[in-house]
Amino acid sequence: MTTLFFPSLVDAEVIEVELLKLDGNFRSLRLLVDSGFTGTNSLVLSESAVELLRAALPATHTSGALQGLKDRGWVTCRIAGLNFQAAQIAIITDTSSLSLPPDVEGLAGLTFLRQFARWGGERTENGWQFYLSDAPELPA
Amino acid sequence: MTTSDQERNLRIAEAVCRDFEWEGRKFREGQCVALLDGEIVAVADNPDDAIAALRALDPNPKHGMVIPITPPSVAVIR
Protein backbone atom coordinates (compact mmCIF):
# COMPACT_ATOMS: atom_id res chain seq x y z
CA MET A 1 0.00 0.00 0.00
CA THR A 2 1.40 3.36 -1.06
CA THR A 3 0.59 7.00 -0.55
CA LEU A 4 2.13 9.35 -3.08
CA PHE A 5 2.52 13.06 -2.28
CA PHE A 6 2.65 15.93 -4.76
CA PRO A 7 3.84 19.40 -3.63
CA SER A 8 1.00 21.90 -3.85
CA LEU A 9 1.20 25.12 -5.80
CA VAL A 10 0.52 28.36 -3.93
CA ASP A 11 -3.10 28.37 -4.98
CA ALA A 12 -3.79 24.96 -6.48
CA GLU A 13 -3.41 21.25 -5.97
CA VAL A 14 -1.63 19.37 -8.75
CA ILE A 15 -0.63 15.82 -9.57
CA GLU A 16 1.92 14.35 -11.95
CA VAL A 17 0.83 11.61 -14.34
CA GLU A 18 2.31 9.87 -17.34
CA LEU A 19 0.34 9.25 -20.52
CA LEU A 20 1.30 6.41 -22.84
CA LYS A 21 2.37 7.51 -26.30
CA LEU A 22 1.66 5.42 -29.37
CA ASP A 23 5.38 4.61 -29.68
CA GLY A 24 5.33 2.98 -26.24
CA ASN A 25 7.06 5.81 -24.40
CA PHE A 26 5.37 8.00 -21.81
CA ARG A 27 4.73 11.74 -21.72
CA SER A 28 4.66 13.36 -18.28
CA LEU A 29 2.01 15.93 -17.50
CA ARG A 30 1.14 18.04 -14.50
CA LEU A 31 -2.63 18.27 -13.99
CA LEU A 32 -4.70 20.55 -11.80
CA VAL A 33 -6.85 18.65 -9.30
CA ASP A 34 -10.47 19.71 -9.71
CA SER A 35 -12.99 17.67 -7.74
CA GLY A 36 -15.67 19.99 -9.12
CA PHE A 37 -15.09 18.47 -12.56
CA THR A 38 -17.70 15.73 -12.57
CA GLY A 39 -19.24 13.25 -14.98
CA THR A 40 -17.92 10.14 -16.67
CA ASN A 41 -14.78 11.84 -17.97
CA SER A 42 -11.57 11.72 -15.94
CA LEU A 43 -9.32 14.31 -17.55
CA VAL A 44 -9.33 17.52 -19.55
CA LEU A 45 -6.29 17.81 -21.81
CA SER A 46 -5.14 20.36 -24.35
CA GLU A 47 -5.37 19.69 -28.06
CA SER A 48 -1.70 18.66 -28.10
CA ALA A 49 -2.78 15.46 -26.37
CA VAL A 50 -4.64 14.27 -29.45
CA GLU A 51 -1.48 12.33 -30.37
CA LEU A 52 -1.94 10.29 -27.17
CA LEU A 53 -5.43 9.02 -27.97
CA ARG A 54 -5.77 5.25 -28.24
CA ALA A 55 -9.42 5.25 -29.31
CA ALA A 56 -12.23 7.70 -29.82
CA LEU A 57 -15.60 7.94 -28.20
CA PRO A 58 -18.55 10.21 -28.92
CA ALA A 59 -18.19 13.91 -28.10
CA THR A 60 -19.71 15.09 -24.84
CA HIS A 61 -21.70 18.10 -23.73
CA THR A 62 -19.98 20.25 -21.13
CA SER A 63 -21.15 23.05 -18.90
CA GLY A 64 -19.45 25.41 -16.51
CA ALA A 65 -15.91 26.59 -17.15
CA LEU A 66 -15.96 24.69 -20.46
CA GLN A 67 -19.13 24.86 -22.48
CA GLY A 68 -20.48 23.13 -25.54
CA LEU A 69 -19.84 19.89 -27.37
CA LYS A 70 -16.26 18.67 -26.81
CA ASP A 71 -14.22 15.94 -28.46
CA ARG A 72 -12.86 13.23 -26.25
CA GLY A 73 -10.92 10.00 -26.40
CA TRP A 74 -9.23 7.27 -24.39
CA VAL A 75 -5.73 7.76 -23.06
CA THR A 76 -3.68 5.34 -20.98
CA CYS A 77 -2.58 6.99 -17.75
CA ARG A 78 0.17 5.76 -15.45
CA ILE A 79 1.33 6.79 -12.01
CA ALA A 80 4.34 4.57 -11.55
CA GLY A 81 4.73 5.27 -7.83
CA LEU A 82 1.27 3.85 -7.19
CA ASN A 83 1.52 0.95 -9.61
CA PHE A 84 -1.48 2.51 -11.35
CA GLN A 85 -2.12 2.23 -15.08
CA ALA A 86 -5.54 2.38 -16.70
CA ALA A 87 -7.44 3.79 -19.65
CA GLN A 88 -9.09 7.12 -18.90
CA ILE A 89 -11.60 9.24 -20.78
CA ALA A 90 -10.11 12.63 -21.63
CA ILE A 91 -11.90 15.68 -23.00
CA ILE A 92 -9.63 17.21 -25.62
CA THR A 93 -10.11 20.94 -26.02
CA ASP A 94 -8.59 24.39 -26.02
CA THR A 95 -7.77 24.81 -22.32
CA SER A 96 -6.83 28.50 -22.52
CA SER A 97 -10.16 29.54 -20.99
CA LEU A 98 -9.33 27.54 -17.84
CA SER A 99 -6.48 29.91 -16.92
CA LEU A 100 -4.31 27.03 -15.79
CA PRO A 101 -1.12 27.79 -13.83
CA PRO A 102 2.17 27.68 -15.77
CA ASP A 103 3.34 24.16 -16.64
CA VAL A 104 -0.09 22.70 -15.85
CA GLU A 105 -1.51 20.99 -18.92
CA GLY A 106 -5.01 19.97 -17.94
CA LEU A 107 -7.45 18.85 -15.25
CA ALA A 108 -7.89 15.65 -13.26
CA GLY A 109 -11.50 15.42 -12.10
CA LEU A 110 -13.53 13.57 -9.51
CA THR A 111 -13.89 10.42 -11.61
CA PHE A 112 -10.11 10.18 -11.80
CA LEU A 113 -9.62 10.78 -8.08
CA ARG A 114 -12.19 8.18 -7.07
CA GLN A 115 -10.14 5.41 -8.63
CA PHE A 116 -7.92 5.65 -5.55
CA ALA A 117 -8.73 4.56 -2.01
CA ARG A 118 -7.97 8.02 -0.62
CA TRP A 119 -7.03 11.45 -1.91
CA GLY A 120 -6.73 14.88 -0.40
CA GLY A 121 -4.56 17.69 0.88
CA GLU A 122 -2.31 17.61 3.90
CA ARG A 123 -0.13 20.24 5.59
CA THR A 124 3.34 18.85 6.24
CA GLU A 125 6.60 20.31 7.45
CA ASN A 126 7.35 20.90 3.76
CA GLY A 127 4.11 22.82 3.23
CA TRP A 128 0.85 21.72 1.68
CA GLN A 129 0.87 18.55 -0.35
CA PHE A 130 -1.78 16.68 -2.27
CA TYR A 131 -1.84 12.92 -1.96
CA LEU A 132 -3.18 9.90 -3.80
CA SER A 133 -3.22 6.62 -1.98
CA ASP A 134 -4.12 3.02 -2.57
CA ALA A 135 -4.06 2.46 1.20
CA PRO A 136 -7.55 2.42 2.68
CA GLU A 137 -6.59 4.28 5.84
CA LEU A 138 -4.05 6.85 6.96
CA PRO A 139 -1.03 5.33 8.74
CA ALA A 140 -1.24 5.62 12.55
CA MET B 1 -13.60 4.00 -42.48
CA THR B 2 -16.30 5.96 -44.26
CA THR B 3 -18.48 8.75 -42.94
CA SER B 4 -21.45 6.39 -42.97
CA ASP B 5 -19.51 3.88 -40.86
CA GLN B 6 -18.69 6.65 -38.39
CA GLU B 7 -22.32 7.75 -38.33
CA ARG B 8 -23.44 4.17 -37.74
CA ASN B 9 -20.90 3.86 -34.91
CA LEU B 10 -22.39 6.97 -33.31
CA ARG B 11 -25.93 5.70 -33.80
CA ILE B 12 -25.07 2.39 -32.14
CA ALA B 13 -23.26 4.19 -29.30
CA GLU B 14 -26.26 6.40 -28.64
CA ALA B 15 -28.68 3.47 -28.67
CA VAL B 16 -26.51 1.23 -26.49
CA CYS B 17 -26.11 3.91 -23.80
CA ARG B 18 -29.80 4.85 -23.94
CA ASP B 19 -31.40 1.39 -24.18
CA PHE B 20 -28.58 -0.93 -23.00
CA GLU B 21 -29.45 -2.97 -26.10
CA TRP B 22 -28.71 -3.12 -29.82
CA GLU B 23 -30.38 -5.43 -32.32
CA GLY B 24 -31.46 -7.80 -29.57
CA ARG B 25 -28.07 -7.90 -27.90
CA LYS B 26 -28.20 -6.71 -24.29
CA PHE B 27 -25.53 -4.87 -22.35
CA ARG B 28 -25.11 -3.90 -18.75
CA GLU B 29 -23.84 -0.75 -17.13
CA GLY B 30 -20.07 -0.78 -16.69
CA GLN B 31 -19.29 -2.77 -19.81
CA CYS B 32 -17.31 -1.23 -22.67
CA VAL B 33 -18.28 -1.74 -26.30
CA ALA B 34 -15.81 -1.47 -29.20
CA LEU B 35 -17.22 -0.33 -32.53
CA LEU B 36 -15.53 -0.54 -35.91
CA ASP B 37 -16.95 0.12 -39.38
CA GLY B 38 -20.48 0.32 -38.01
CA GLU B 39 -20.33 -3.00 -36.17
CA ILE B 40 -19.87 -4.08 -32.57
CA VAL B 41 -16.57 -5.94 -32.58
CA ALA B 42 -15.93 -6.49 -28.87
CA VAL B 43 -17.58 -6.19 -25.47
CA ALA B 44 -15.41 -6.13 -22.36
CA ASP B 45 -15.74 -5.48 -18.65
CA ASN B 46 -13.09 -2.76 -18.72
CA PRO B 47 -11.91 -0.16 -21.25
CA ASP B 48 -8.36 -1.51 -21.52
CA ASP B 49 -9.60 -4.86 -22.84
CA ALA B 50 -12.07 -3.22 -25.23
CA ILE B 51 -9.38 -0.89 -26.62
CA ALA B 52 -6.95 -3.81 -27.00
CA ALA B 53 -9.56 -5.82 -28.90
CA LEU B 54 -10.31 -2.89 -31.20
CA ARG B 55 -6.65 -2.13 -31.88
CA ALA B 56 -5.96 -5.79 -32.61
CA LEU B 57 -8.45 -5.53 -35.47
CA ASP B 58 -7.32 -2.08 -36.65
CA PRO B 59 -4.23 -0.45 -35.15
CA ASN B 60 -5.16 3.05 -36.35
CA PRO B 61 -6.34 4.97 -33.24
CA LYS B 62 -8.49 7.18 -35.45
CA HIS B 63 -10.58 4.22 -36.53
CA GLY B 64 -13.50 2.94 -34.48
CA MET B 65 -14.49 3.90 -30.98
CA VAL B 66 -14.90 2.44 -27.50
CA ILE B 67 -17.90 3.47 -25.45
CA PRO B 68 -18.52 2.87 -21.76
CA ILE B 69 -22.07 1.76 -21.05
CA THR B 70 -23.28 4.60 -18.86
CA PRO B 71 -26.38 6.73 -18.96
CA PRO B 72 -25.87 9.92 -20.98
CA SER B 73 -24.53 12.75 -18.82
CA VAL B 74 -23.17 16.26 -19.06
CA ALA B 75 -19.61 16.96 -17.97
CA VAL B 76 -19.57 19.82 -15.47
CA ILE B 77 -16.36 21.77 -14.90
CA ARG B 78 -16.93 24.07 -11.92
Image (cartoon, rainbow, N blue to C red):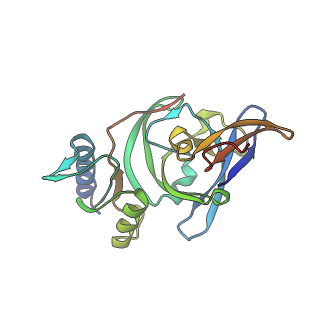
Q: Residue furthest front?
A: A140
Residue B68 visible in rendering: yes
Q: Is A108 left or right of B27, judged from the image as shown?
A: right
Q: Is A91 left or right of B45, judged from the image as shown?
A: right
Percent x, y for residue B49?
Answer: 39, 63
Q: Is B56 left or right of A45, judged from the image as shown?
A: left
Q: Is A86 left or right of B56, judged from the image as shown?
A: right
Q: Nearer the viewer, residue B61 or A123?
A: A123
**Residue B52 position (above or below residue A59):** below
Residue under the image location 65 percent in, 46 percent down: A132
For the N terminus of chain A, the quadrant is bottom right
Q: Nearer the viewer, residue A23 or B51?
A: B51
Residue under the image location 22 percent in, 53 percent down: B8
Percent x, y for residue A9?
Answer: 76, 38
Residue under the image location 61 percent in, 68 percent down: A25
Percent x, y for residue B66?
Answer: 36, 56
Quarter of the view holding residue B61 = bottom left
Exactly how many numbered labels are in the figure?
A: 0
Residue B37 visible in rendering: no
For the C terminus of chain A, the quadrant is top right
**Residue B17 position (above or below residue B75):** below
Residue under the image location 64 percent in, 43 percent down: A137
Percent x, y for residue B78?
Answer: 54, 28
